[in-house]
Structures are given as C-alpha cells and as structure tokens.
C-alpha cells in the first residue's frame, strides 16, 4: 500500500518540496529576527547611529521600542525552551527510575 501511495503522490513532490523549503526559510528568518544576540547588536548600532546623527530622536525611540519588544519575545522564547527541555529531562529521569 505504501508504494501505491507514493506513486499516487509523486506528481505533488515539487509542491511538497517547495513548501518544505519555504517553511525552513521562514523558520530561519524568525530565528534570526528574535535572536537575542542580533537584537543586542542592532541596539548598539542604533546607539552609534544616534550619536553620529544618522537617526533622529523620534526614529531612534520607535526603533528602540521595536528592538526592546523583540528582545522581550526572544527572552520569553528562550525561557519557554529551557522549561520544555527541563520537563523533557525530568520525564526521562522518571521513566528511567520507574
């Protein structure tokens, strides 16, 4: 049955491949957008640009607010990942004990 299914779905392979690539690109873009390291780098660059007069006070404030929000999201995601890993580790320890 598996072979028949694969043959029947073969014409859709390019679509599935394209969707997979698009999903991976979106995941990477999201990872970079909410990378704490990247946000901190952008904040430092914003400070430099403001000191050198390339960014006005309003633009700086707006960009800073956006970056601080992204930083908060990045830290929340990181905290959630750590909690998830802790829960998975805890579950593995319990299954080994049991």
Image (spheres, helix red, strand yellow):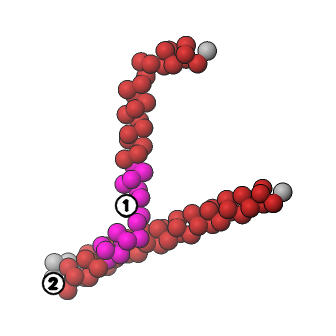
Image quadrant of residue 85? Answer: bottom right
Toward the bottom, the furthest residue is: 51
Q: Main secondary structure of the magenta part?
A: helix
Residue 26 placement (x, y as % from top left): 39, 49
Residue tagged 2 = 52
Q: Look at the picture and state if 15 lies above or below 78.
A: above
Q: Residue furthest right?
A: 98
Q: Locate residue 20, reporting x and y percent.
A: 42, 38
Residue depicted at x 78% and y 56%: 95
Mark 1 — residue? Answer: 32
The residue drawn where x is 30% and y is 73% is 42
In this picture, which residue range is highlighted in magenta? 26-43
Q: Label 1: how many residues lie within 10 Å, few (<14), some (14-19) or many (20+)?
A: some
| Relative horizontal placement of residue 57, taking residue 88 as reference (left or right) | left
* Left or right, 85 with reference to 62: right
Helix, strand or loop at mark 1: helix
Quadrant showing the N terminus: top right
Dot 2 crowding, Cα within 10 Å, few <14, some 14–19, many 20+: few
Q: Nearer the viewer, residue 95 or 75?
A: 95
Q: Position of residue 2 (x, y in %)?
A: 58, 18
> Helix or strand or loop: what does disc 2 sit on?
loop
Magenta segment includes 27:
yes
Q: Residue at x 20, y 79 (%)?
A: 49
Can residue 72 be seen by looking at this rendering?
yes
Q: Residue furthest front?
A: 96
Number of numbered discs overlaid on the protein picture:
2
Rendered residue at 25%/77% (across/down): 45
Instruction: Measure the alpha-carbon separation of dots 1 and 2.
Output: 26 Å
- Is 34 rendered above or below residue 44? above
């Amino acid at each position: 049955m598996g072979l028949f299914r694969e043959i029947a779905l073969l014409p859709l392979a390019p679509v599935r491949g394209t969707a997979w690539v698009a999903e991976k690109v979106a995941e990477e873009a999201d990872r970079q957008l909410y990378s704490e390291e990247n946000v901190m780098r952008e904040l430092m660059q914003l400070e430099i640009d403001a000191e050198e007069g390339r960014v006005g006070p309003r633009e700086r404030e707006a960009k800073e607010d956006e970056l601080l929000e992204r930083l908060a999201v990045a830290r929340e995601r990181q905290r959630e990942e750590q909690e998830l890993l802790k829960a998975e580790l805890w579950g593995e320890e319990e299954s080994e004990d049991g």
